[in-house]
Image: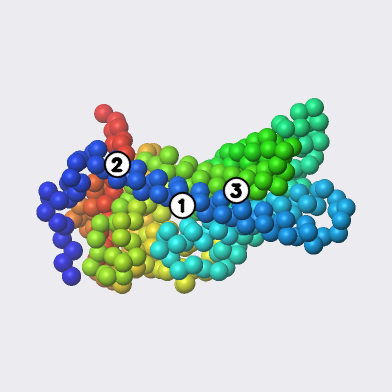
Amino acid sequence: MDTSFPPETETINPWPSADIGRSHYFLMNINQLLYFMSLTGGLAGLLAWAGQALILMLLPVGIAPWASVVVAAALLGGSIGGFIVAFDEKLGGNRMQIRWVAMGALVGFCAGIVSGALHLPLRAALPAALPLGVVMGWMVSGALIGAGLGARWLAVNRARVAHGMIGGMCGGFLGGVAFATLSQWLPDVSQALAFVLTGAGISFGITFAPVFLRSAVLRFVNSGDARAIGKLGKKEWTVQDGDSYIVGSQSADLSKSRYGREVDIYLPDASIAPRHARIYSKDGRFFITRHPDVMSESGLRRFVLKAQNRSITAPRELQDQSLIVLGRTTLMFLANHKPERSQ
């Protein structure tokens, strides 16, 4: 298979309108991603509200207030956790793994229980400002649920936990304001709306932080393997300072992880090793190197890894619009800004 690069004119400027067109292309993809993740979270929140309403109908009359709060928060966390993991795998091109979805739901469920247990004491601590206590209670719930879900990407970047916490806190704020504002007049509607806004806010925050803080984008260009073309299409991966991605062909089916992927960027190309390369950042600069699994003499011969048409045997820095060839698949690294070099 010919792995040579396309002509220079196509490589250097694959967009018709240079940087303006490229920025617009990124914006469209990002908007779609944020929209669908928010929609997923909102749907999870609505499902959680319906579930807790059904459970409360089946429970005896006069149940303690703390029990209903814990049930509501646990269902909210579990629903959001399961939905986010499922949708994230769908976006990654992987086959959905029941164990990952179940683990995401369990993590969210446990975080919801903890946050629910803290909800009423927090409201009781602010008796003179009940609406503020309600809002803060929802923010705590959102923060704990978001942090638990952010832990899924801990191997990629430790900051993802903080991203999830901040995103969840923002979502909880929206939900708390809706609940505190409307609960006196429309108690049922206010609670449903609060669940939906909290779910959408948590999902939006977890997705938006890495996108907003991105330093570069890795874009799928082409492949000699029809499976990669069919699954990836115009797929892009955001890259930010502190990230470390394993790139390879190991599908989710073969992963032994219970919550996250062993391969962060999945490329369904038969000529790519299960764990082929690693892309990582250091001091605001980005590098690609071979994975230790393919550093042997046979691995160097069998598994192609090139950047700008040069074979990679040691870490190599990536520049804006660098083309990367892994097996028969080509990716493009696009930096938002070029790092300043010391003189």
Q: Is residue 137 visible?
A: no
For badge 2, the amino acid type reads His
Q: What element carries label 1?
A: helix
User: In whole angstroms, how far apart are the C-alphas of marks 1 and 3?
Assistant: 14 Å
Q: Can residue 31 be seen in this view?
A: yes
For the N terminus, the quadrant is bottom left
Q: Residue 24 carries which label?
A: 2
Residue plotted at (34% across, 68% down): 268
Query: How many marks overall?
Result: 3
Few, some or many C-alpha atoms within 10 Å of disc 2 (few <14, some 14-19, many ≥20)?
A: few
Few, some or many C-alpha atoms within 10 Å of disc 1 (few <14, some 14-19, many ≥20)?
A: some
Q: In the displayed orientation, state which residue is furthest to the right.
A: 62
Residue 48 position within the rendered picture, expressed as x and y whole percent measured from the top left:
65, 55
Q: In this view, does 66 lie to the left or right of 328?
A: right
Q: Is mark 3 on a helix, strand or loop?
A: helix
Residue plotted at (56% across, 50% down): 42
Give 114 or 320, whichever is nearer the viewer.
114
- Reply above or below: 183 against 229: above
Q: Residue 27 carries which label?
A: none
For badge 1, the amino acid type reads Phe
Which residue bears the numbered disc 1? 36
Which residue bears the numbered disc 3? 196
**Quick one: label 1 or label 3, which is nearer the N terminus?**
1
Residue plotted at (29% across, 49% down): 333
Q: What element carries label 2?
A: helix
Residue plotted at (58% across, 38% down): 170
